[in-house]
Image (cartoon, helix red, strand yellow):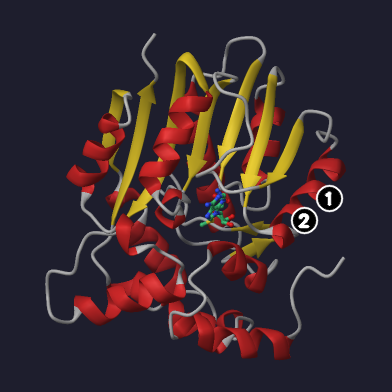
Amino acid sequence: MSQKPGWARRMAAWPRFLLGRGNDAGQLYDLRGAGAIEGAGDTPLVNMGYWAEVSPRGADALQKACYALFDLVADGAGLDAAEAHVLDAGCGFGTNACHIVERFGSAWVTGVNVSAVQLAIARDRAALAGVDGKVNFLLASVTDLPVATGSMDAVVSVEAAFHFDTREQFFAEAFRVLKPGGRLSMVDLVVPPAHRWWHAPALDLVCRSQAVPRANIYDLAGWMQRLRAAGFEVMEEESIVDRVFPAFRRWMLTRPPHVHLRYDLMYIVASLPYLVYPFDYVRVVARKPG
Ligand SMILES: C[S@@+](CC[C@H](N)C(=O)[O-])C[C@H]1O[C@@H](n2cnc3c(N)ncnc32)[C@H](O)[C@@H]1O
Protein backbone atom coordinates (compact mmCIF):
# COMPACT_ATOMS: atom_id res chain seq x y z
CA MET A 1 0.00 0.00 0.00
CA SER A 2 1.40 3.37 -0.94
CA GLN A 3 1.02 5.64 2.09
CA LYS A 4 1.98 8.86 0.41
CA PRO A 5 1.70 10.04 -3.19
CA GLY A 6 5.05 10.43 -4.97
CA TRP A 7 7.07 13.66 -4.87
CA ALA A 8 6.05 14.77 -8.37
CA ARG A 9 2.33 14.32 -7.69
CA ARG A 10 2.61 16.21 -4.40
CA MET A 11 4.50 19.10 -5.96
CA ALA A 12 2.00 19.27 -8.81
CA ALA A 13 -0.96 19.30 -6.42
CA TRP A 14 0.19 21.90 -3.85
CA PRO A 15 -0.22 24.98 -6.08
CA ARG A 16 -3.90 24.07 -6.47
CA PHE A 17 -4.28 24.32 -2.70
CA LEU A 18 -2.29 27.52 -2.39
CA LEU A 19 -4.43 29.05 -5.13
CA GLY A 20 -7.60 27.77 -3.50
CA ARG A 21 -8.62 25.39 -6.26
CA GLY A 22 -8.44 22.24 -4.17
CA ASN A 23 -10.46 23.30 -1.17
CA ASP A 24 -11.38 19.75 -0.26
CA ALA A 25 -10.24 18.10 2.97
CA GLY A 26 -10.22 14.59 1.48
CA GLN A 27 -7.83 15.64 -1.30
CA LEU A 28 -5.67 17.57 1.18
CA TYR A 29 -5.19 14.64 3.56
CA ASP A 30 -4.79 12.12 0.73
CA LEU A 31 -2.02 14.35 -0.60
CA ARG A 32 -0.26 14.52 2.75
CA GLY A 33 -0.56 10.75 3.21
CA ALA A 34 1.29 9.47 6.25
CA GLY A 35 3.35 12.68 6.29
CA ALA A 36 1.20 14.14 9.03
CA ILE A 37 2.43 16.69 11.56
CA GLU A 38 4.97 14.30 13.00
CA GLY A 39 5.20 10.62 13.70
CA ALA A 40 6.44 9.02 16.85
CA GLY A 41 7.59 5.66 15.61
CA ASP A 42 4.97 4.54 13.13
CA THR A 43 2.17 6.62 14.70
CA PRO A 44 1.23 9.45 12.36
CA LEU A 45 -0.37 12.25 14.33
CA VAL A 46 -2.67 14.94 13.04
CA ASN A 47 -3.62 17.17 15.92
CA MET A 48 -1.83 19.83 17.95
CA GLY A 49 -2.18 18.09 21.30
CA TYR A 50 -3.20 19.08 24.83
CA TRP A 51 -0.16 20.28 26.72
CA ALA A 52 -1.55 21.00 30.22
CA GLU A 53 0.74 18.37 31.76
CA VAL A 54 3.13 17.67 28.89
CA SER A 55 6.44 19.46 28.34
CA PRO A 56 7.16 20.44 24.72
CA ARG A 57 10.69 18.99 25.09
CA GLY A 58 11.54 15.43 24.23
CA ALA A 59 11.21 13.20 21.18
CA ASP A 60 7.80 11.84 22.15
CA ALA A 61 6.35 15.15 23.41
CA LEU A 62 3.77 15.55 20.61
CA GLN A 63 2.67 11.95 20.90
CA LYS A 64 2.02 12.39 24.64
CA ALA A 65 0.12 15.63 23.99
CA CYS A 66 -2.00 14.04 21.23
CA TYR A 67 -3.00 11.16 23.48
CA ALA A 68 -3.80 13.64 26.27
CA LEU A 69 -6.17 15.37 23.82
CA PHE A 70 -7.81 12.04 22.90
CA ASP A 71 -8.26 11.26 26.62
CA LEU A 72 -9.74 14.68 27.33
CA VAL A 73 -12.40 14.09 24.66
CA ALA A 74 -13.07 10.46 25.66
CA ASP A 75 -13.47 11.49 29.32
CA GLY A 76 -16.17 13.96 28.25
CA ALA A 77 -18.05 11.28 26.31
CA GLY A 78 -18.82 9.35 29.53
CA LEU A 79 -17.86 5.95 28.11
CA ASP A 80 -17.62 4.05 31.39
CA ALA A 81 -20.98 2.37 30.85
CA ALA A 82 -21.04 -1.13 29.37
CA GLU A 83 -21.44 -1.40 25.57
CA ALA A 84 -21.19 2.05 24.05
CA HIS A 85 -21.39 2.74 20.33
CA VAL A 86 -19.17 5.69 19.52
CA LEU A 87 -18.73 7.64 16.29
CA ASP A 88 -15.38 9.41 15.74
CA ALA A 89 -16.01 12.26 13.29
CA GLY A 90 -12.93 13.09 11.21
CA CYS A 91 -11.01 10.10 12.56
CA GLY A 92 -7.63 10.70 10.87
CA PHE A 93 -5.45 7.57 10.97
CA GLY A 94 -7.83 5.86 13.40
CA THR A 95 -5.47 6.45 16.32
CA ASN A 96 -8.21 7.74 18.60
CA ALA A 97 -10.69 5.01 17.56
CA CYS A 98 -8.16 2.29 18.45
CA HIS A 99 -7.23 4.10 21.67
CA ILE A 100 -10.87 4.29 22.80
CA VAL A 101 -11.33 0.54 22.33
CA GLU A 102 -8.06 -0.17 24.14
CA ARG A 103 -9.08 2.12 26.99
CA PHE A 104 -12.76 1.17 27.22
CA GLY A 105 -13.06 -2.49 26.26
CA SER A 106 -16.84 -2.19 26.12
CA ALA A 107 -16.81 0.43 23.33
CA TRP A 108 -17.45 -0.10 19.62
CA VAL A 109 -16.13 2.70 17.45
CA THR A 110 -17.06 3.82 13.94
CA GLY A 111 -14.46 6.18 12.50
CA VAL A 112 -15.58 8.42 9.65
CA ASN A 113 -13.18 10.18 7.31
CA VAL A 114 -13.11 11.63 3.80
CA SER A 115 -9.47 10.62 3.22
CA ALA A 116 -9.16 7.16 1.65
CA VAL A 117 -5.37 7.20 2.18
CA GLN A 118 -5.76 7.83 5.92
CA LEU A 119 -8.46 5.16 6.22
CA ALA A 120 -6.28 2.51 4.55
CA ILE A 121 -3.62 3.22 7.20
CA ALA A 122 -6.29 3.24 9.93
CA ARG A 123 -7.50 -0.24 8.96
CA ASP A 124 -3.94 -1.61 9.00
CA ARG A 125 -3.29 -0.04 12.39
CA ALA A 126 -6.50 -1.47 13.89
CA ALA A 127 -5.59 -4.95 12.65
CA LEU A 128 -2.05 -4.61 14.05
CA ALA A 129 -3.43 -3.48 17.40
CA GLY A 130 -5.86 -6.42 17.41
CA VAL A 131 -8.93 -4.18 17.74
CA ASP A 132 -10.26 -4.52 14.18
CA GLY A 133 -13.25 -6.52 15.45
CA LYS A 134 -14.39 -3.48 17.45
CA VAL A 135 -13.67 -0.59 15.13
CA ASN A 136 -14.91 -0.01 11.62
CA PHE A 137 -14.05 2.81 9.29
CA LEU A 138 -16.34 4.53 6.80
CA LEU A 139 -15.23 6.62 3.85
CA ALA A 140 -17.92 9.31 4.08
CA SER A 141 -18.50 12.90 5.05
CA VAL A 142 -19.77 13.55 8.57
CA THR A 143 -22.08 16.14 7.02
CA ASP A 144 -24.05 13.28 5.42
CA LEU A 145 -23.57 10.24 7.63
CA PRO A 146 -24.46 6.75 6.36
CA VAL A 147 -25.43 5.88 9.94
CA ALA A 148 -28.87 5.08 11.36
CA THR A 149 -30.78 7.74 13.25
CA GLY A 150 -30.55 7.37 17.05
CA SER A 151 -27.92 4.60 16.91
CA MET A 152 -24.94 6.16 18.74
CA ASP A 153 -24.29 6.57 22.47
CA ALA A 154 -21.60 9.16 21.83
CA VAL A 155 -20.09 11.20 19.04
CA VAL A 156 -16.50 12.35 19.52
CA SER A 157 -14.43 14.58 17.30
CA VAL A 158 -10.84 15.74 17.70
CA GLU A 159 -9.68 18.87 15.88
CA ALA A 160 -11.57 18.18 12.67
CA ALA A 161 -14.86 20.13 12.60
CA PHE A 162 -13.22 23.33 11.29
CA HIS A 163 -12.89 21.43 7.96
CA PHE A 164 -16.50 20.20 7.81
CA ASP A 165 -18.56 21.80 5.07
CA THR A 166 -20.31 23.00 7.08
CA ARG A 167 -19.76 22.59 10.82
CA GLU A 168 -23.48 23.36 11.32
CA GLN A 169 -24.41 20.49 9.00
CA PHE A 170 -22.20 18.22 11.12
CA PHE A 171 -23.97 19.39 14.33
CA ALA A 172 -27.29 18.46 12.70
CA GLU A 173 -26.00 15.01 11.71
CA ALA A 174 -24.41 14.36 15.12
CA PHE A 175 -27.74 15.26 16.74
CA ARG A 176 -29.61 12.92 14.40
CA VAL A 177 -27.40 9.83 14.92
CA LEU A 178 -27.22 10.18 18.73
CA LYS A 179 -29.64 8.33 20.97
CA PRO A 180 -31.68 10.60 23.25
CA GLY A 181 -29.35 11.41 26.17
CA GLY A 182 -26.28 10.63 24.03
CA ARG A 183 -23.27 12.90 24.22
CA LEU A 184 -21.22 14.93 21.79
CA SER A 185 -17.70 15.45 23.17
CA MET A 186 -15.30 17.34 20.96
CA VAL A 187 -12.41 19.75 20.60
CA ASP A 188 -12.13 22.04 17.61
CA LEU A 189 -10.01 24.79 16.14
CA VAL A 190 -11.97 28.05 16.10
CA VAL A 191 -11.03 30.37 13.25
CA PRO A 192 -12.29 33.89 14.05
CA PRO A 193 -12.59 36.59 11.38
CA ALA A 194 -9.53 38.72 10.64
CA HIS A 195 -9.23 41.77 12.96
CA ARG A 196 -6.01 43.38 11.75
CA TRP A 197 -4.79 44.12 8.26
CA TRP A 198 -2.11 41.41 8.38
CA HIS A 199 -4.60 38.79 9.56
CA ALA A 200 -6.46 38.90 6.26
CA PRO A 201 -3.74 37.28 4.08
CA ALA A 202 -3.04 34.72 6.83
CA LEU A 203 -6.75 33.83 6.98
CA ASP A 204 -6.86 33.57 3.23
CA LEU A 205 -3.93 31.14 3.26
CA VAL A 206 -5.56 29.09 6.05
CA CYS A 207 -8.85 28.74 4.16
CA ARG A 208 -7.25 27.89 0.83
CA SER A 209 -4.42 25.64 1.89
CA GLN A 210 -5.99 23.93 4.90
CA ALA A 211 -9.42 23.28 3.39
CA VAL A 212 -11.41 25.48 5.78
CA PRO A 213 -14.79 26.58 4.38
CA ARG A 214 -15.44 30.31 4.71
CA ALA A 215 -18.82 29.44 6.29
CA ASN A 216 -16.90 28.15 9.35
CA ILE A 217 -15.19 31.47 10.11
CA TYR A 218 -16.65 32.85 13.35
CA ASP A 219 -15.58 33.30 16.96
CA LEU A 220 -16.23 31.10 19.99
CA ALA A 221 -19.58 32.77 20.75
CA GLY A 222 -20.73 32.04 17.19
CA TRP A 223 -19.50 28.43 17.53
CA MET A 224 -21.52 27.89 20.75
CA GLN A 225 -24.59 29.59 19.33
CA ARG A 226 -24.61 27.18 16.34
CA LEU A 227 -24.20 24.14 18.61
CA ARG A 228 -27.19 25.21 20.73
CA ALA A 229 -29.24 26.00 17.61
CA ALA A 230 -28.78 22.35 16.54
CA GLY A 231 -30.70 21.32 19.68
CA PHE A 232 -27.83 20.34 22.01
CA GLU A 233 -27.82 21.01 25.76
CA VAL A 234 -24.35 22.21 26.68
CA MET A 235 -22.87 20.45 29.75
CA GLU A 236 -19.28 21.77 29.61
CA GLU A 237 -17.66 24.46 27.50
CA GLU A 238 -14.25 26.11 27.72
CA SER A 239 -11.56 27.65 25.60
CA ILE A 240 -8.38 25.57 25.95
CA VAL A 241 -6.37 27.68 23.53
CA ASP A 242 -3.75 28.44 26.22
CA ARG A 243 -3.18 24.69 26.72
CA VAL A 244 -2.82 23.97 23.00
CA PHE A 245 -1.17 26.74 21.02
CA PRO A 246 1.75 28.13 23.12
CA ALA A 247 3.33 24.72 23.76
CA PHE A 248 2.55 23.43 20.26
CA ARG A 249 4.21 26.49 18.73
CA ARG A 250 7.21 26.09 21.05
CA TRP A 251 7.41 22.43 20.08
CA MET A 252 7.27 23.31 16.36
CA LEU A 253 9.93 26.01 16.63
CA THR A 254 12.34 23.85 18.60
CA ARG A 255 12.33 20.92 16.17
CA PRO A 256 15.78 20.36 14.68
CA PRO A 257 15.91 21.98 11.19
CA HIS A 258 16.45 18.66 9.41
CA VAL A 259 13.06 17.46 10.74
CA HIS A 260 11.29 20.32 8.96
CA LEU A 261 13.10 19.48 5.76
CA ARG A 262 11.27 16.15 5.65
CA TYR A 263 8.08 18.02 4.80
CA ASP A 264 7.15 19.45 1.44
CA LEU A 265 8.14 23.10 1.07
CA MET A 266 4.55 23.93 0.11
CA TYR A 267 3.28 22.29 3.27
CA ILE A 268 5.66 24.40 5.35
CA VAL A 269 4.36 27.56 3.63
CA ALA A 270 0.76 26.47 4.23
CA SER A 271 1.52 25.89 7.92
CA LEU A 272 2.96 29.34 8.63
CA PRO A 273 -0.41 30.87 9.69
CA TYR A 274 -0.42 28.43 12.62
CA LEU A 275 2.42 30.45 14.09
CA VAL A 276 0.72 33.84 13.84
CA TYR A 277 -3.07 33.75 13.39
CA PRO A 278 -5.15 34.49 16.54
CA PHE A 279 -6.99 31.15 16.61
CA ASP A 280 -9.14 29.98 19.48
CA TYR A 281 -9.63 26.35 20.48
CA VAL A 282 -12.78 24.99 22.10
CA ARG A 283 -13.62 21.96 24.23
CA VAL A 284 -17.28 21.07 24.55
CA VAL A 285 -19.43 18.35 26.06
CA ALA A 286 -23.07 18.52 24.99
CA ARG A 287 -26.07 16.24 25.23
CA LYS A 288 -29.03 15.40 23.05
CA PRO A 289 -32.04 16.01 25.32
CA GLY A 290 -34.32 13.16 26.15
C1 LIG B 1 -6.68 17.64 11.75
S1 LIG B 1 -7.20 16.04 11.26
C2 LIG B 1 -7.62 15.29 12.84
C3 LIG B 1 -7.65 13.79 12.78
C4 LIG B 1 -7.92 13.04 14.06
N1 LIG B 1 -9.18 13.44 14.66
C5 LIG B 1 -6.80 13.18 15.04
O1 LIG B 1 -6.91 14.00 15.96
O2 LIG B 1 -5.80 12.47 14.91
C6 LIG B 1 -8.81 16.35 10.51
C7 LIG B 1 -9.46 15.09 9.98
O3 LIG B 1 -10.80 15.37 9.57
C8 LIG B 1 -11.05 14.68 8.35
N2 LIG B 1 -12.19 15.33 7.69
C9 LIG B 1 -12.23 16.57 7.14
N3 LIG B 1 -13.45 16.84 6.63
C10 LIG B 1 -14.22 15.74 6.86
C11 LIG B 1 -15.58 15.41 6.60
N4 LIG B 1 -16.42 16.27 6.00
N5 LIG B 1 -16.03 14.19 6.98
C12 LIG B 1 -15.19 13.31 7.60
N6 LIG B 1 -13.90 13.58 7.89
C13 LIG B 1 -13.42 14.77 7.53
C14 LIG B 1 -9.74 14.76 7.61
O4 LIG B 1 -9.63 13.88 6.54
C15 LIG B 1 -8.77 14.48 8.76
O5 LIG B 1 -8.65 13.10 8.97
Residue 116 appears left or right of 282:
right
Amino acid residing under circle 2: Ile
Question: What is the spatial separation of the Cα atoms under label 2 and label 1, in whole angstroms?
Answer: 5 Å
Amino acid residing under circle 1: Asp
Q: Is residue 124 above or below residue 272?
A: above
Q: Residues within 10 Å of mark 2 (few under 14, many from 20)?
A: many
- Determine whether the residue tagged by mark 1 lies in a helix, strand or loop: helix
Which mark identifies residue 94? none
**Residue 171 in sight from this viewpoint:** yes
Q: Position of residue 78 (x, y in %)?
A: 49, 19
Residue 118's image quarter? bottom right
Q: Is residue 90 above or below residue 20?
A: above
Label 2 close to label 1 by CB (< 8 Å):
yes
Q: Residues within 10 Å of mark 1 (few under 14, many from 20)?
A: some
The quarter of the picture where the C terminus appears is: top left
Residue 287's image quarter? top left
Q: Is mark 2 within 8 Å of ligand 1?
A: no
The quarter of the picture where the N terminus appears is: bottom right
Residue at screen point 60% across, 20% down? 151
Residue at screen point 32% across, 56% down? 216
- Determine whether the residue tagged by mark 2 lies in a helix, strand or loop: helix
